Amino acid sequence: MSAQPKTAEAAGDGRHTIDACFLGPYGENDTLLEKLVVEFLRDHVYWRRNFHPEDPPAISTAAAQHPEYLAFEARMRRELHQLSAALKKSVPFHSPRYIGHMASDLLLPGLAAQILTLPYNPNNVSEDAAPVTVDLEVQVGLQLARMLGYVHDPARADCAFGHLTSGGTVANYQALRLALALKAFPVALQAAGVPEIALPDDAWSAFNLAPRESTLLVEQWKQWLAQATPADRRTWRARVQDQRIEQRGLADFFATHATLKVPKVLAPITAHYSWSKGCKLLGLGRAQLELLPERGMRVDTDALEETLERCLRERQPVLLAVAVMGTTEYGTVDPIDGVVAARGRFAARGLGFSVHVDAAWGGYLATLFRNEDGSLRTREDVAAGFTAFPSPGVYAAVAALGATDSVTVDPHKLGYLPYGTGAFICRDHRAMALLSEEADYVFHGAAPKDYLGRYRSLGQFIPEGSKSGAAVAGVYVTHKVLPLDHAHFGLLPAQTIRSAEAFHARALRFADEMAGVVQAVVPFAPDSNLVCFALNPAGNRDVAVANAFVRRLHDELRCDPRQPLQNKQFFGSVTTLRPEALGEEETHRILDALGLDVATLGGDDDDKLMILRHTLMNPYLIDRENGISYIDLYFDHLGARVRALLAAT
């Protein structure tokens, strides 16, 4: 049962809002979820019965007594019971003892909304297959756009647009796809010889327009077509289409425009591997992905500047510069403001490119920076209640989100929603016209002029051909119940930031307490709610020995389906620190603090340093109801395991 509030507690601190958000570590809100599921299952059945009540039941009342029916029910129950038993080996994401990967308990509004919608089985490819949830998906895009600081008023010509994807990987593919279409379109207009539209004189200049300029050309082209005669419209549409990169393909496009090189994608060395996959998938080639060095696990803007200078000098186009808001390994936030500023400077010099933010992990942290009216909070307001968050750099980065060209966000990460809900959001929806695809059996009729009507044929614009409307419903309802601002949804990331700060402080105390047993270092202060911890047995100088020790620790912290879950006290994860990502100065700083000899780096399996990684999503890591700190319990457990492992060697 849910814990009753204590009378001495102050009302309105948000704590009990969080208490109502989840099924709970102990299943405390089971009655609430059961009531919702039963209520809306019955409601769905009533809907079926009242669709055409004159139609008689197709399944007889006697069917449930037939041997075949009973045999089928028995088989179904057997398989479901076996599945239920097998799932007990699942990772206990719901527990405050789980501090491993980017997963936690699920928000009840999203879970209930998805369960509610599943029997209707909407396919969010068009309104013909999902007349309700397609509209909800477009609304979700606007909700996320508001959170990020994009224009979110559909009445505005430059309103943003967003849609859901299976995950952040597909959203990153969409970013590449849109950036390439936007970059190549002015060249197609130029090659087709379209009259009455002002275009650059040469292919290089056309290929390197700033994204805003290219987007305005898309709008001008649509307006020009609208004013042309039907015959001219058909002729010129065909001419431009024949010159587009989507029609010709990369090889033919660049063979035709021999002065142009295939553009590069610039991303931090810690960027997610989806960028490598995306470059291969689009045919750009992995060689076109250039990884930039970092400073303190955040992209080095000086290195970005030098790379852009080289590209300009060598007439090497740049498709996209990627900044990361919350790396999946370390939770660090790149200087997005610095990347945006570089885009402006180089666009003025004739090297235009898009800026995309991969905020798959950290996107929902932006709720902490939003007032209820959608405006940006001051850093002082955001910082109230935290020890160090947000740093000036993190605040500047989040404040710059609205000036970027597109963003990836994962509701199924820090949005606490079921898997299958990533999101792609672009700053100006007019660019999406370049991705439009037509299938006569799915999409038909003239394109509507209003914003919502245009995207009811959603499948024309998204990578997927079929997608779950139930997942969309979960995201939409969650955002309605918990609006994306600091006073509502922001209560959740605020709690996780406080946990991260408590974890960081406890890690530093642990390092002092264990001095002489193990050398322990937090390699860099956390930007978000992910904290890494490096350990090395006292007196050891060899990286290989330190890595072997951390691997043994991780063996005791990872999920092992061969053992009962209850055998594990806590669940954690690991990652590595790579010298090529850290840079020489940072590598020496961290290894010196651990007492490790940098000269021992470089073996086949020990060319990087293995460290523990802790994702602090669970809102009950500090259980005030029962006076328990699972953070303290974790470090007590970690200390005991460190001593036991060292004693055994």
Image (cartoon, rainbow, N blue to C red):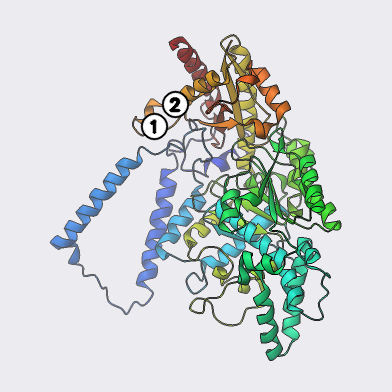
- Other-residue count near label 1 (Cα within 10 Å), few / some / many at <14 / 14–19 / ≥20: some
Quick check: 543 above or below 184?
A: above
* Image x and y of residue 411, in percent: 56, 50
* Image x and y of residue 470, in percent: 47, 60
In the depicted view, which residue is nearer to us: 263 or 21? 263
Q: Which residue is mark 1?
A: 560
Callout 2 secondary element? helix
Task: Give the mark nearer the N terminus: 2 vs 1.
Answer: 2
Type of the residue with mark 1: Asp
Q: Is residue 32 left or right of residue 488?
A: left
Q: Is residue 401 left or right of residue 441?
A: right
Q: How far apart in space, not on screen, are marks 2 and 1 (Cα)?
A: 8 Å
Q: Is residue 544 left or right of residue 648?
A: right
Q: How many marks can you see?
A: 2
Quick check: 84 above or below 54?
A: above
Q: Does the image show residue 528?
A: yes
Question: Mark 2 touching mark 1, by CB under 8 A?
Answer: yes
In the depicted view, which residue is nearer to us: 593 or 640? 593
Q: Does the image show residue 157?
A: no
Type of the residue with mark 2: Asp
Quick check: 550 above or below 419?
A: above
In the depicted view, which residue is nearer to us: 500 or 64? 500
* Image x and y of residue 256, in percent: 69, 69
Q: Which residue is mark 2?
A: 555
* Residue drawn at x 63%, y 52% as measured from the top left: 408
Callout 1 secondary element? loop
Q: Picture quarter containing residue 189?
A: bottom right
* Residue drawn at x 26%, y 73% as measured from the top left: 58
